[in-house]
Image (cartoon, rainbow, N blue to C red):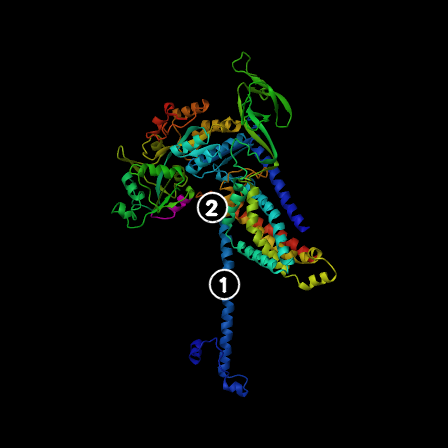
Amino acid sequence: MKNIFWLACFAALFAAGCSSSTTTDSDAPAADASIPESNLVGEIKIDGSSTVQPISDAVREEFIKLHPQVNVIVSGNGTGNGFRSFYDKGTDVSDASRPIKAGEFEKCQANGVSFIELPVAYDGLTIAVNPENDWVKELTIEQLTKMFVGDDAAKNWSDVDPSWPNEPIKIFAPGTGSGTYDYFHEVLAKANDSELRGDMTLNENDNILVQGVAGNKYSIGFFGVAYYAANKDRLRAVPIVNPKDNTAYEPSVENISSNKYAPFSRPLFIYVNSESLNRAEVQTFVEFYIENVSDLCEAANSVRLPQEIIDHAQQNLDARELGTHFVTEDGESREGAFAELFQNENLVK
Amino acid sequence: MSIDSISQDAPQDPGVQRPIPEAIRQGASATAESTLNSRHRKRVSKAFYGLCVAISLLSVLVLVVLLISIAVQGHSRLTPTLLTGSHSTSEPASSGMYPAIIGSLAICFVCALSALPLGIGTAIFLEEFQPTNIWLRRLHGFINLNISNLAGVPSIVYGLLGLSLFVFMFNAFGQIKVNESSGTEIMGVERYYQVLTLAGGGDSVLIPQSDLSQPTITITEPMPAVDRQGNTFQLEVWDPKSETPKPSDPAIRHRTVRLGQGGGAYAKTSWYYFRLPFGRSFLAAGLTLSLVILPIVIIASQESLRSVSPSLREASYGLGATKWQTVRNVSLPAAIPGIMTGAILAMGRAIGEAAPILVVLGATVAKNSGPQNLMDTVVTMPVLIFHWAGDPQFTYQQLAAAAIIVLLLILLLMNSVAIYLRQKMRIE
């Protein structure tokens, strides 16, 4: 009989939770009387890049203020893992910090998943060191290659530059399922077909990387600029020498959007399942996303896209232009600058 | 210095009994030698006592340091917002743990509901119904051995088991996909198409779905629809190419859709919505946790049944009671306080587990409410604390400490309610 009482306590708490949750939900929009309460319902599943996740989270929070009955679930398991659930029809929207790969595109085609590719923001892949690190003033691509590529990569800072301390380099990097890892790999190692060194500390959670770099004087790490901007007092971003004009640029908003922070400026995408887009809640959410992402991404410490690219994305969404711009008809990844590739004639369904 | 002198006197192992001094054997009550010996032994005894106190104080000290550091870090965030708000990335200061508290309690509820009857039942079988047949005895011993082994299995292993057993159900019932009905939804779901109306701002109507194989609908003619109160009405269609102007009355706009407007499937679920496989739901998480605590419940209940005096049982048998009557009226009531203690400890473990929950539900913490139906996902307190503690922003660090305080208080509350009930049972 005491067991029953105990269970009854739980049941009461549980019931209180369920009922009061709905009241708290509806309180928020009721405060603003000018907006009529939306009756939109449903569930939207989002997974993918942890670099895009802060943007999607910000959009989600604004969206559910307007549509409190829509359940938006945002996960950040990495671009590659996100695409895996996307082509298995596990998610409606996939966040990506790199364009879809040819192999993933084939899987989508094989599983009958068609999608709309929408760029949402710019990111500067930031190479960060500890603030106590006073020897690294700037890094060139050659130095980065020396530090990050191959199993015979530099063990100590002095191996990269003899004037630097003779201390081991401690590297914190995103996991291999992340688009940031893939992008970094592509910039440094794709050309000569080698791999990034195997002895880095990998983690899909960028916050762990931030803490790792902030906690060790001889460490270095790389992640999206949003995670650097949120932790400016504990990290120092290293200016990267642009191979075109041999000048070092910081990952600042201006340098990223003007593409001076090359080659580590990159666009971020969302991929929307076209079948899900028939659903009223997904359609409303994605339209809200594209309309508001430029303002919201700055709050999430990313860099807004030029208006013409957002307009183009908006047109593609309105016209339901399916397919990707970054894979050719023969299943090869396209090479080139983002703005040149993001044209309708490059679309492959 | 005296220790040195003694060790010179007695170079052999101090544990070994030294020969009784000749004077004492002759009848003297004490000699210089024996006094020295007894003083030495008393000193060693005192030193050992001091060591014991120091060791136990050390563990208390660790607890005190933990509590103080958490209190210092988290006290500024112990606000009503912490209990009523939900996780927010854009405004960390307004974050709260309301959905996590409800989620943890919901999971605990499922866990208690499944693990306690199973565990106590197993313990009764193992303790009260011991067979006499040699083969059945061996089977009994085998089960006993395995339960002790299961108690030592790390919880993350149970998480992986729960993932394939409850979340995916070995894919025997298909996979859960977006835009598709899994086909094994047993109850609590009504299927509609949701179509946007002319009112804008995400306003929509629901149209009952008759054919599950059609995930989308295109509105070409007026058809019956339902509003959110469940009333059926006739849905109007407005053709933008026709001469008729777009209706301006908001009431009509709410009931009118554009010609050719598409709509997708929407599953309206009641709280008892039940589906196979369970997916990433709190039901799956609760059942997984019940696997984690089942061996603990069984072993604690066994211990407590074992400690019931055999004479009580024998008296019951002597009065002609059957085995079941003895268990029901004698053994179980006598053992209940002990069983309760085991159950409390087990539930405390369940509410604090993070690893199996992370495997079963994933690390998502952005959710604004408790579970809305049996198949809904939840955020739990340990996972939320894990997420906040991993975030380098200072506000989240403070929030994590405050959330730990809340978690400890809830644990304390649960335990004290259970201890109170246990005391009450004992008097009865």
In depth, the one of B257 and B272 nearer the eye is: B272
- Considering the numbered disc 1 on the image, is that residue within a helix, a strand or a loop? helix
As drawn, the residue found furthest toward the right would be B319
The reply to whether the magenta stretch includes residue A27 is no
How far apart are the two marked residues, 1 and 2, measured between alpha carbons?
A: 30 Å
Residue ID for mark 1 = B55
State the residue at coordinates (52%, 65%): B53
As drawn, the residue found furthest toward the left would be A162
Query: Overall secondary structure of the magenta stretch?
Result: helix
The residue under label 1 is which amino acid type? Answer: Ile
Q: What is the x, y in percent for residue A159? A: 27, 47
The residue under label 2 is which amino acid type? Answer: Ala
Residue ID for mark 2 = B389
The reply to whether the magenta stretch includes residue A211 is yes
Q: Which residues are magenta?
A: A208-218
Q: What is the x, y in percent for residue A302? A: 40, 34
State the residue at coordinates (33%, 29%): A337
